[in-house]
Amino acid sequence: MQQDIAEVIAIEKSATAFPWSEKNFEDSLKSGHHAWVYFDDLDEIIGFALVQKVVDEMHLLNICVKPREQGQGLGRAILDHVINFANSISAVLIVLEVRRSNQRAQQLYLQSGFNEMSVRKDYYPTEVGREDAVLMGLDLGLVSLFSDK
Ligand SMILES: CC(C)(COP(=O)(O)OP(=O)(O)OC[C@H]1O[C@@H](n2cnc3c(N)ncnc32)[C@H](O)[C@@H]1OP(=O)(O)O)[C@@H](O)C(=O)NCCC(=O)NCCS
């Protein structure tokens, strides 16, 4: 993903009000976090995801779709890929933080089986102050328990 970082940063900036910096991406990659970029038919990057494995949990650090490609199922496809990856490395839980105001992302997570676990008060900056993060989790142990029946 290193060579794609400029394109990824451009997507991040166009899609979010408080984007990760170049250093955030570089530090994440240097730390050995898993990252994927997704290409369209013209070999342009249209989305990406980064995750961190912590013992048997996986943290979804960032997921983003280029604005003009949003609303067409790509976000769900990327999240499905992340969930499949988590299963393949035997993670038992996927956790993530999402802005309380980001209803679009929360809908996606809820539809994929995530539940609200807790709230981190005033976690994110906003234009006018701070806003809460909703901590969401997908219990993969529970999913496989049910899918085995
Ligand atoms: C969140 C994000 C990744 C979703 O990607 P996407 O490609 O637009 O999502 P999809 O087209 O796969 O839609 C998946 C679900 O998201 C929700 N969704 C998509 N567009 C929506 C909208 N305009 N309003 C509300 N919910 C919406 C719906 O639940 C949708 O499922 P449905 O189509 O079955 O109803 C994308 O909006 C994005 O990159 N946002 C900016 C970055 C961001 O907020 N990342 C999450 C940080 S926690």
Image: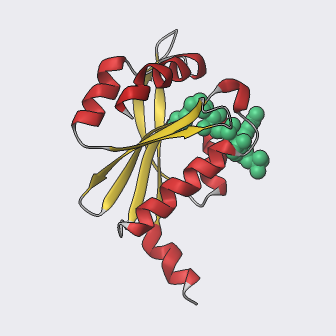
Q: How many marks?
A: 0
Residue 92 against residue 51 in the figure, above or below: below
Ligand 1 - quadrant of the structure image: top right
Name the residue at the right extreme: 72
Q: Is residue 95 visible?
A: yes
Q: Is residue 7 above or below residue 53?
A: above
In the depicted structure, whether residue 85 falls above or below residue 27: below
The picture places residue 65, in percent across and down from the top left corner, at 61, 33
Instruction: Find residue 148 and report its image quarter.
Output: bottom right
Percent from the top left, x then y, of residue 85?
A: 44, 60
**6 or 75, nearer to the observer:** 6
Q: Is residue 100 visible?
A: no
User: What's the colour scheme?
Assistant: secondary structure
Q: Residue at x 30, y 53 (%)?
A: 53
Please tell me which residue is depicted at 37% across the width and 18% down the height of the picture.
21
Image point 41% across, 25% down: which residue?
Answer: 5
Side of 109 relative to 68 (left or right): left
Residue 11 coordinates in the image, percent (x, y): 55, 22
Q: Residue furthest bottom?
A: 149
Question: Going by the image, does 50 lie left or right of 27?
Answer: right
At which x and y percent is residue 55?
A: 23, 60
- Residue furthest to the top in view is 128
Quadrant where the N terminus is found in the figure: top left
Picture quarter with the C terminus: bottom right
8 or 112: which is nearer to us?
A: 8
The residue lying toward the viewer, choosing from 111 and 128, is: 111
Q: Is residue 24 left or right of residue 127?
A: left
